[in-house]
Amino acid sequence: MNDHSTASEERARARSLGIVVGALPTGPLNAITDVEGVLVGHTTLDDGADLHTGVTAVVPRQLTTGRRALPAAVCTGNGYGKLVGSTQVGELGVLESPIVLTATLSVFRAADALLTYLMRLRRDGLSFNPLVGETNDGFLSDIRRRPITERHVLDALEGASGGLPAEGCVGAGTGTTALGFKAGIGTSSRRPAVDGAQVTVGALVQANFGGVLTVQGVPMPVGELVPDAGPEEPSGNSCMIVVATDAALDARQLGRLARRAVFAMGRVGASYSNGSGDYAIAFSTAPPRLATLPDDALNPVFAAVMDSVEEALLNSLFTATTTTGVHGHTSHAVPYDRLPRKTRD
């Protein structure tokens, strides 16, 4: 088992391949960790054979250094999934825990492990709301083994850090597929100007959904790009999106951001199928003393969400490597030589 992904081939992010999404500037890392205080940790389980799975944790440091909750919202694009803790976020409009992502049949063990983490962090209290999402990596990983343990979850949480998070076949994205290709974890950020001040919006995705990959408006069916890929049925069935911002927004406004995060899946060709669990979680790290932004100032923030999620999804695909897993199933990496190029000066 590996704690960190080690790719056998050199892979690249969208911008390194000449693919630029939108005109807004990115943060210095072009990652969710550009939002001050937002950390990311992974635990990867990859035995080179039947297990390709793991855990990814998004940890707002504000929740570990004094604040009990952050304004937050959840958007359910299609509810065929297991997002533990989401109803309380929707009811109260706050996030009380880090966000953990994993595989479908491991989500309940991960929630229990996150509860352990929260109880250690806060010695008082009789109720805690761990938030844990999932996608189904059963095409490449023996999901019925439920290999995720408390230690794996705690390692991702306790090892979370700033800096550019690992992408592709790592953490909760180790065994995921999307749009017919191997996918995984991806991230991106934008820094729009709002009412004369710059704010940061960051996104992290666990991509595992169906449709036809579309890059800058160009459809790229796996059957045409990888003729020996076989049937296109292993195209995944869900997507988890986490959006963080330092803009001063309330829960209602964050719900508007979360909806646009789900909309952004359509830009890359999502089919939004019956069996897809498509969810977005949005939260704000802004100090509570700041006045909430007016709704009529939010257009640049909406654009930042759409662009950062689109690029995060592309990064999740472009950084992933061809993987062969359980039952000999193979998911192929996106071939770079067929990508459209459109750079911005």
Image: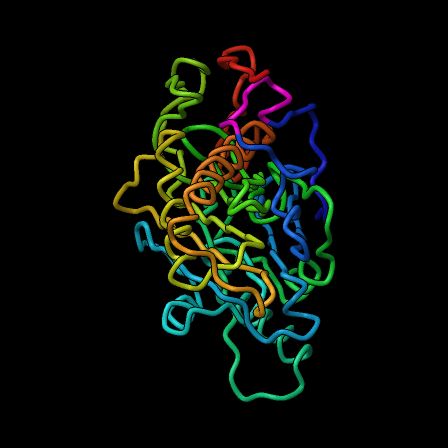
Q: Position of residue 135 (x, y in %)?
A: 45, 50
Q: Is residue 289 left or right of residue 135?
A: right
Q: Is residue 10 left or right of residue 341?
A: right
Q: Nearer the viewer, residue 340 or 259?
A: 259
Q: Residue at x 74, y 57 (%)?
A: 159
State whether residue 3 appears in this view: yes
Residue 217 placement: quadrant: top left
Residue that sits furthest to the left in the current view: 274
Q: Nearer the viewer, residue 79 or 38?
A: 38
Q: Nearer the viewer, residue 259 or 194?
A: 194
- Vertical order, 73 against 238 (above or below): below
Q: Position of residue 127 (x, y in %)?
A: 51, 84
Q: Residue at x 35, y 41 (%)?
A: 263
Residue that sits furthest to the front in the current view: 196
Q: Work out which quarter of the rendered image holds the C terminus and state it.
A: top right
Residue 265 falls within the magenta-colored stretch: no
- Vertical order, 69 against 280 (above or below): below
Q: Position of residue 330 (x, y in %)?
A: 50, 29
Count of number-bearing discs:
0
Residue 173 placement: quadrant: top right
Q: Position of residue 116 (x, y in %)?
A: 62, 76
Q: Nearer the viewer, residue 129 or 297?
A: 297
- Vertical order, 196 against 229 (above or below): below
| Color scheme of the displayed model | rainbow
Residue 187 placement: quadrant: top right
Please provide the residue range marked out in magenta: 14-23
Q: Residue at x 63, y 60 (%)?
A: 59
State whether residue 202 appears in this view: no
Q: Is residue 232 left or right of residue 149?
A: left
